[in-house]
Image (tube, rainbow, N blue to C red):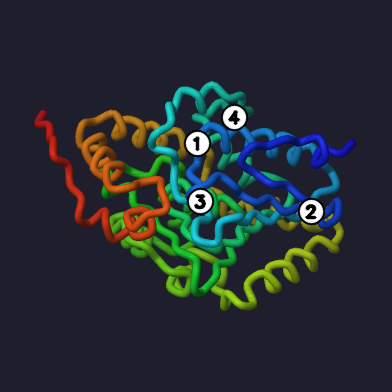
């Protein structure tokens, strides 16, 4: 029996076009939030991919055309995710992203729908990002929660879009459509939605036919010059969770949930804009 046959994830669908080409589909209705269930599935998948010597390309897409990965699950108990086994010794989400970025297989994010916050951090940790010009939305809205991004977005974006545009993305907390994201270097390119699936399939299939040793070598040499040092990520994770415990964060969180956060609602679809209209009702002073 193969791993794909035996693997029984609850929030992922894993399929193989061939032993060399895998497709991983996020499927956690209603909006694909990233909680303990999805994180467990991802950790189990990574454990297999880290030792699999046949997989060359892994494409990550979504079963929901409107939501790729909405953001971190802000209702879940974070201790459940932190209790999951990992290999890096880092916090659960950082463990996933660091391992993802260092896989020998080529990883491709096929972004159709919204990828904000931790969803944006996931695609930034993959090797290649293709976006639907009409349907992709990316953003880092943590500043609106009175927090810094906890999954390394500042470090990864800085190498992709430069210092000034990283400030623009992180300080503004707004949404970027696929076309603008491509212009900035946030994604590789934006593809008209009518051609999106065929383009991604053709590219992934082409790469999956090359010699695996060469693909691994290319990744190693590129990673040597482009991946942030792993030690920067725990400090960012700690900063996020410190902010999440403060009353300002909790006030904004409660307001957004009362308006439909983590459901297929106006607030979730337009969170980048709505963050600019939502402020803490409780504040503290030193």
Q: Are marks 4 and 1 in contact (CB under 8 Å)?
A: no
- Residue 69 has which mark? 3
Mark 3 vs mark 4, foreground winner is 3
Q: Is residue 81 above or below residue 98?
A: above
Mark 4 vs mark 1, foreground winner is 1
Q: Secondary structure at mark 4?
A: loop
> In x, y percent, where is residue 66?
50, 61
The residue drawn where x is 41% and y is 40% is 150
Q: Is residue 67 above or below residue 86?
A: below
Q: Which residue is mark 1?
A: 35
Horizontally, residue 222 falls left or right of residue 95, namely right
Q: Nearer the viewer, residue 278 or 146?
A: 278
Which quarter of the figure has residue 273? bottom left
Q: Which of pointers 4 and 1 lies earlier in the amino acid sequence?
A: 1
Mark 2 vs mark 3, foreground winner is 3
Which quarter of the figure has residue 246? top left
> In x, y percent, where is residue 283?
12, 35
The residue drawn where x is 86% and y is 39% is 2
The N terminus, quarter of image: top right
The residue drawn where x is 63% and y is 28% is 87
Q: Secondary structure at mark 2?
A: loop
Q: Which of pointers 2 and 3 lies earlier in the amino acid sequence?
A: 2
Q: Are marks 1 and 3 in contact (CB under 8 Å)?
A: no
Q: Which residue is mark 4?
A: 88
Question: How far apart are the alpha carbons under marks 2 and 3?
Answer: 24 Å
Mark 3 residue crowding within 10 angstroms, few (<14) / some (14–19) / many (20+): many
Q: Nearer the viewer, residue 177 or 126?
A: 177
Question: How far apart are the alpha carbons under marks 2 and 4?
Answer: 23 Å
């Amino acid at each position: 029996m193969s791993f794909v046959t035996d693997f029984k994830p609850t929030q992922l669908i894993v399929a193989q076009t061939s032993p060399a080409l895998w497709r991983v589909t996020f499927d956690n209705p209603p909006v694909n939030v990233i909680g303990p269930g999805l994180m467990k599935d991802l950790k189990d998948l990574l454990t297999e991919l880290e030792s699999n010597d046949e997989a060359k390309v892994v494409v990550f897409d979504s079963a929901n055309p409107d939501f790729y990965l909405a953001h971190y699950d802000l209702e879940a108990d974070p201790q459940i995710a932190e209790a999951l086994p990992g290999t890096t010794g880092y916090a659960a989400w950082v463990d996933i992203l660091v391992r993802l970025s260092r896989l020998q297989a080529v990883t491709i994010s096929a972004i159709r729908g919204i990828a904000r916050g931790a969803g944006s951090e996931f695609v930034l940790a993959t090797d290649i990002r293709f976006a639907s010009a009409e349907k992709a939305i990316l953003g880092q809205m943590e500043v609106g929660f009175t927090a810094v991004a906890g999954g390394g977005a500042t470090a990864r974006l800085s190498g992709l879009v430069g210092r000034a545009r990283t400030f623009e993305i992180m300080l503004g907390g707004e949404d970027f459509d696929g076309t603008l994201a491509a212009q900035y270097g946030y994604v590789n390119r934006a593809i008209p939605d009518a051609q999106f699936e065929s383009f991604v399939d053709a590219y992934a299939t082409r790469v999956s036919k090359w010699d695996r040793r060469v693909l691994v070598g290319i990744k190693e040499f590129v990673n040597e010059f482009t991946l942030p040092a792993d030690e920067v990520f725990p400090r960012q994770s700690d900063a996020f969770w410190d902010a999440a415990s403060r009353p300002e964060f909790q006030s904004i969180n409660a307001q957004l949930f009362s308006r439909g956060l983590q459901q297929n609602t106006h607030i979730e679809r337009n969170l980048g804009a709505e963050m600019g209209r939502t402020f803490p009702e409780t504040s503290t002073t030193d």
